[in-house]
Image (cartoon, rainbow, N blue to C red):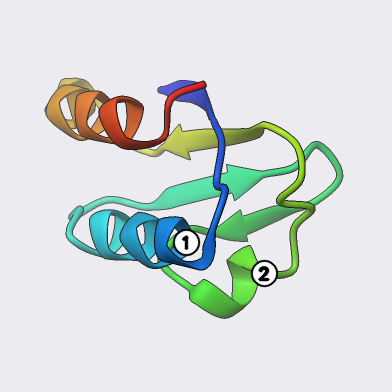
Amino acid sequence: MEMSIMVRSFEDVRALVDLATAQPFRVWISDGRQTADAKSMMCIFSLDLCQPLTLQLDCGEEGNEALRQFGQRFGT
């Protein structure tokens, strides 16, 4: 499952990491050049946060609620 998101502040990064960490599956984030573990604040800061990012959830149907939560908080 994928979606486009925007991270606009340090508080957004912290909320993204908190939400990703709460998931029992892997959560990835990409700026188009690099892909990082969304459960790691340090990894997220290695990305270009000035543009929309792609969020990818490594899950099946169990990720629908998580995708909704990410979209509600960070959707573009």
User: Residue 69: x percent and y percent?
Assistant: 21, 33
The residue indicated by pointer 1 is: 13
Q: What residue sits right under mark 2 in the picture?
A: 45
In the rendered image, the vertical position of residue 56 relative to residue 29, given as above or below:
above
- Answer with the quarter of the image where residue 67 lies: top left
Horizontal placement of 36 versus 39: left or right?
A: right
Mark 1 lies on a secondary structure that is: helix
CB under 8 Å between callouts 2 and 1?
yes
Q: Earlier in the sequence, mark 2 or mark 1?
A: 1
Tag 1: amino acid: Val
What kind of residue is marked 2?
Phe
Residue 26 drawn at (x, y percent): 37, 52
For label 1, count other residues whose C-alpha is less than 10 Å away and answer few (under 14), some (14-19) or many (20+).
many
- Residue at point 41% right, 64% down? 11
The mark found on residue 57 in the picture is: none
Q: Does 71 sit above or below residue 73?
A: above
Q: Residue at x 67, y 43 (%)?
A: 30
The quadrant in which the N terminus is found is top left
**Front residue of 60 and 27:** 27
Residue at (48% x, 35% y) in the render: 56
The residue located at (67%, 69%) in the rendering is 45
Q: Residues within 10 Å of mark 2 (few under 14, many from 20)?
A: few
